[in-house]
Every structure is written in structure tokens, then in C-alpha cells.
Amino acid sequence: MAQDVLQQTYDAIVVGSGATGGWAAKRLSEAGLKVALLEAGRAVTPEEFTEHMPSFQLKYRNHSPEVMRTRPIQRQCYACMEYNYEWFVNDLENPYSTPPDRPFTWQRLRVLGGRSLVWGRQSYRLSDADFKAASRDGYDVDWPFSYADLAPFYDTVERYVGITGAAEQNEMLPDGQFLPPMKMTCGEIRLRNSIKKTFGRTLTIGRAAVLTQPHNGRAACHYCGPCERGCMTFSYFSSPFTTVKDALQTGNCTLITDATVSHVDMDASSNQAQGVTFVHRTTKETKQIRGKSVILCAQALESTRILLNSSTREYPKGLANSSGLLGHYLMDHVVGGGALGTFEDLKIPPSASPPHRPNGIYVVRFRNTPATGAHPHFIRGYGFQGGSSPSFNMDAPGIGTDYKKAVKLGTYQVSLGAFGESLANFDNFCEIDPDLKDAWGIPALRISMAHGKNEAALMRDAGVTAAEMLEAAGATNIHVTTGVEMPGMAIHEVGTARMGNDAKKSVLNAFCQSHDVKNLLVTDGSCFVSSACQNPTLTMMAITVRACDHLVARFRRHEV
Amino acid sequence: MKSRSPDATVPVAKPGPPSPLINRRDLVRAALFASAASALGPAFSFAQAVSSGLTPAALGEDGSAFLTDPNWKAAFLSDQQNETLIGLSDVIIPATGTPGAKEAMVNRYLDLLLSVQPVEFQRQFVDALAFIDSESQKQFGKDFRSLAGNDQIWLLTPWAYPRQPSHWMEQEEKPDLPQPHFERLKGLIAAAYYGSEIGQKELGWDGSVTHGPYQGCEHSTTAHT
């Protein structure tokens, strides 16, 4: 590594190159700040994308013993496959612990772009029903800003990223700057019409970070299907080929890959962060880099791990933790409730050839809304994701010619799966495990989280309402699930460094700036005050842009 | 990022001359390299970064070559088990107007799969094969692989359909022990067949990576009200 890269002092050090780190690097470098962007993993190129590789060319057809051996946790995520498992962390090198009765699955990528390479791309705004939820139902606290404060930044992000979707004028799910919506199937249109008529509920096509027309120099989706293996036309949003690329093109951003940040370095005399220390991924050398500000975008749990590992004499419980709340209020959407059925009268055979729509449908939250009033059994709510399309019927009875015909004839399925709000709870937390280190000698996390009674009630209700909606639309053979999956399964973990206006009750202010250390920001999902029930990445990106613009203004006022 | 999609329906590319997409891919890659190199300087290059950490798939390796290896030897199955499996797969998914499980080398893929699965998975599979043979011995006094085709069909067919309680006696139906064994084998054979190139073609895969935009429902706006 060229030493001169490490010998200069940057205006900003951004840790993490995923959805939020990419935005931070882009926004700050385009504003003229000198930025160092640190990524724990290696770079990635389109050469290694496998979205068009036939599945039968995988030796084990996605049952690779190497994946089973090295990614026993990561492979719980559908996107960790024999195609791309090296993007995901090696669980043997990246341990964490949990109490025996509180399991948590932690899905991580260490490669340029992080989880933006494999994310589900669903992109939904939060509303004041979320930001001001505490004021309505009395649970916990409101966010330190309102929807109106964040709306312009949602606009900025959506216009750049390219979000396909349809406007619905639903107060629980604000509309955005949409590219043309993807089309629905026959079954989805039937379900949409039925549940609007029967229940007054809104089903819309998924709002996704996938281009339906050329946009900002990227081509429209060609509907090959498996986005999580990369996209050679960059039609879904991932940071290496958008925000990070833009940042590098300014000439103001230096990308340093293979840099696993262990902790933030402090100047005790000024109470300012002065840079970070990292361990090189391959050489395991320890190095330092200096900056006038540090922005952590490493993913909620990783950013908090860095802060907890940054204890000083002044901050013995972890850096920026005078509140004692760092690590607490960990959240991840509760999943497990829903229903599956068939539309037996829709006789449309499936096909293994494209087009394959990389998107589903979304049922907007309809519980505990201003219109419906308070539910007797739970607070907050859930949204459904799902779809309805023909699929091959491998479970068909029989053998021989009849079986082959039945498989191809297929069944027309319809499914809804809920993503519910995970309530902010002090007792769901992460901390440093004193007995566990990763392969780079960095102390690892102990994660302790369990969903509670409210989450269980949400999923029970979701099973019931999903079934009633499918039944009303004419589905048969309905199967219901009402369980609660292990925390972490939604891969929507947020919280652990919450924002707030009161420094005694929060870690960050409304601009993701540490209350304790003014030149330290955390703009990934750590800052969330509540989880809402919408997929969080769009909101993380909007918050990052807002925080970075605020930081740039402080630079211009010479406050940093 | 939650639910797992059926891999059997994943579209795939056929080998052949470079497509317009490939050309675009090269152009984009060159542009990216240029922009990154200018920003990073000589100390940081993508070439360095990608020197390790790629999956066999990302390296473009075709892992299916073993299926047609003339020197193929089973890694897990005995000769008898292999022959029983070939016979079973040929009855469950025969060649019709299209090739069947035997042509798709279902036995070779399942042998490889079994060789890397946990002991319990292996045991259940071997037990299921042994069960088929024991039933064949009971009915015909021969192993399954030695039966005539019609007798093989006759033996398997009752297990291939859902069971229904007897109409004649009001007593609890005894669980049908053979059926789970058969269903286990059928499920794995079907997955191996439809996951093969032959199986994908059976399901309509034509090797194209795109057929234009997704059209969705093409009925009238009132068709699904």
C-alpha cells in the first residue's frame, strides 16, 4: 500500500462502501471534500458476475460443501449461493456469539459495495405514522425529525438511484419519484382489486431500485432474473457502479480496500476523532489513517462494534457512549406471518425462460392507521410482500409421462409474507464479547435479541389477514403461517446508536452526529429510532445524504 | 432479502458468440477500470484486488463436466445402489418426447450430492433404496433393477399418489410407511432432473438471457375485477 495515501489528512474518512458509505463518499467528494473511503473487503468487477450462468453448471447446484463449511450462517440468506458465496463473510473468520436462548442470524458481505450487491432492492419511504409513532401510541420516543425534513432527501436519492413504482396516495406509504412501474400478473391484479373492494386495503407493485427505463447512464432491466448475482448492465442499484464510481470520478475520493477498521482514534485533548485504525485484510498489518471527520457506514452492528471497540479513558463504555445506550435498541423486522394459496382457475403455464420480473407486490400497512384506529392486541403494524404467478409443480403426484406433463402444467400460486415492526427495546442489544476475536484480532460482538409479544401478535394477525385476503380473491388450498422467525432473518437490522435530541437518551443527534464527539457521524441503520415496517435501505440513504449535507455546511462554516 | 426463490426457474445463458450485452460489459468494465485507476493510483488496482476470493462460478468454471466423464466412478453409491437409482429415475421420469432422468445423468449428480451431505441424509437415502429392493423382493422375488419395466411401474405407482382413508371401516388409517421412502427418492430425482440442462430445456429454457421487457397481464383492464 502506498504510504502517501495514509500520510495525508483527509476531510472525511468514510468507513464502509455499501448503500450508505457510497452515498457519503459521493456527496462529500462532490462537495469538494477530500475523502478516504475504507472498505473491509476487496474490490469487485462485473467480470465476476454470474447472473447469466446456467444453474446446472454449478458443480453442486447450490449445495456446495465449501459453502456449508465456511458459510453455515451466511447461507441462511437465499442470496448466499454457490455462485457468489465469497462476497459473504467467512463465518469461521468472522465469529459472533449469542446467548443460547436468543439466537440471531447476522448476514454480512465484505466486498466493495457490501450488501448493496445482493440486496432485495425494495425501496419504501417511511411516513410520519412512523417518525411520530410514539406520539400516537405512547410507546418509546419519536424520531428527532419529521417526514417533511427527510422528504427532499428521499427525492434526491430516488432521482439518482431510479426507483420503479406506482403512486398510490396512501398516507402510510408516501409516494416518491418513480420510474414507470413494472407490470402485475393476472393473479396480482385479481388480488389487488379484490382486497381494495373487500377490505379497502392497498396492494401496489413493488417499489424497487431496478430501472424500467435507461437512467443516469445505466441501462433498463433486461429481466434475466437473479439480481443478487450481479448485473452486467447495472440495472439494479449497487454502490460500486454508481455512488462509489461517481465519488472516484471527482478526483477527491481515495478508495482503500482490504481495510478492516478496528476502532476510531481520538485526540483526547480536543475531544475530536482524528482518524481510524484498520487491519489489512491479507497482510494483517495494522495501519492508521487521519481525517478531520469520521463517518461510520459499516452496517448497524459493525459500526457500533467499532465504537464499542474504541473505548478511551474518557469513554470507558465505548466511544460516543456517555448515554450508555450504544448497542441498545437493536431491531430487525419480524417475519414469519403470511399465507400461500393457489388460483386454480388461472391456467397459465410457467416457463424457465425470461422475462423474469425481479420484483414482487406490496400490501401497504393497514393496522393502527389513523383511518383504522388502534388495534386491541398490538401496536404498530406490518406490510406484506409477495406475488402471484405460475410455477412448476414438482410436487405433482404420479410418475412417468403424466408426472412430466403435470410439472410443466404448473400451479398458479399466490403468496403474502409480512414484514412487521420490531419494537425498540433496550434489552435487545449488542456488546463486545470479551472472549471472542475475529481472524484479524478485533474483538467480536455478542448479540442478544428476541422478538417479543407485540411482534408475535403482529405475525399471528398477519397470518389471519393474509389468509382472508387470499380467500376473498378466490384462492384455494390456502396454507397459513403465524410463527416468528429468528431475529436477523429479515436482514433489516437497525438501531444500536439511536438518534435523538436529548444527549442523555440518544447516541446521535438528528444529523447523525455524535452528541459526545462532534466530528464523528454514524449514518447507517444504527441511527434508526424505530424500525417501522418498511424496508430500511432507502431511508438509510436519505438520512446519509441529509447528514452529509449538514456536515458539508459545517465544513463551510469552519466548524470542523 | 428474505425468501428463497426456486433455482430451477433461473434463466441461464447459452454458450456462443459474444452478445451485444457482452460487448457492453467489456466497455463498462474498461470505463470503470479507467476511472478507478485514475483515482487510486498505481498502488491500488482492481487486478490486485481480484487475485483471490472468487468462487468457481465467478471464475467461469463449468462444474457439470463430471456428468459426461467417460471414466466416471461413483463417489458414494455402490454399484447395486447406482443401478437401482438409474432404474428408479428412469421409471419416475422416463424419456418421452423429451429425454428423461437417465439421459440427464440424475444418478451421477445425486451420487456427488450424497458424497457431501451429512450422514443422516445419506442414511435416509440408502434406507429408501434398500426399502424399494426389499418390497421388490417381497412382491417378485427379485431386486428392483432386475424387474421388467411394467413390474417396476406396478410396484411404484401406489406410492406415487396421495393416500386416502378407507371408506369401508371406521378406524384410523395406519400410516403408510413405504410412501415417505418413495417420496424422498422421487423428490431428489425430480430436483436432479429439472436442475440439469436437459431438465431446464424440458421446462422451456431456451438459453436466452432476455426476451424483452416483462409484460405482465395482457388481458383487458376489467378481466380480473
Image (cartoon, coloured by chain):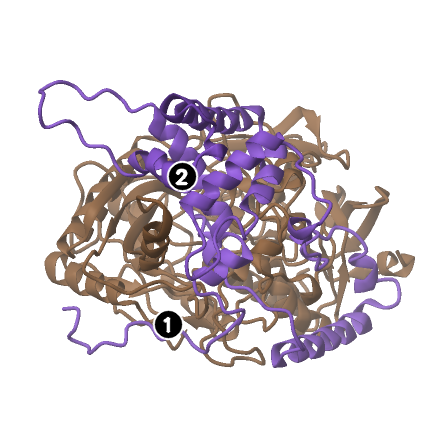
Chain colours: A brown, B purple
Is there any visible trace of residue A264 in the rendered image? no
Q: Secondary structure at mark 1?
A: loop
Is there any visible trace of residue B2 in the rendered image? yes
Query: B203 or A328: which is nearer to us?
Result: B203
Residue at 36% from the left image edge and 58% from the top image edge: A408
| Quarter containing the C terminus of chain A | bottom right
Residue at 20% from the left image edge and 42% from the top image edge: A464
Other-residue count near label 1 (Cα within 10 Å), few / some / many at <14 / 14–19 / ≥20: many
For disc 1, the marked residue is A182
Label located before the other in sequence (2 or 1): 1
Q: Position of residue B96 (x, y in %)?
A: 41, 57
Q: Is residue A163 left or right of residue A387?
A: right
Marks 2 and 1 sit apart, C-alpha to C-alpha, by 34 Å
Instruction: Read off the chain for label 2.
Output: A
Q: As shown in the figure, which amino acid type bears the numbered disc 1?
A: Met
Question: In this rendering, is residue B100 above or below B23?
Answer: above
Q: Is residue B173 left or right of residue B144?
A: left
Nearer to us of marks 2 and 1 is 1
Q: Position of residue A385 (x, y in %)?
A: 34, 54
For disc 2, the marked residue is A424
The answer to whether marks 2 and 1 sit on the same chain is: yes
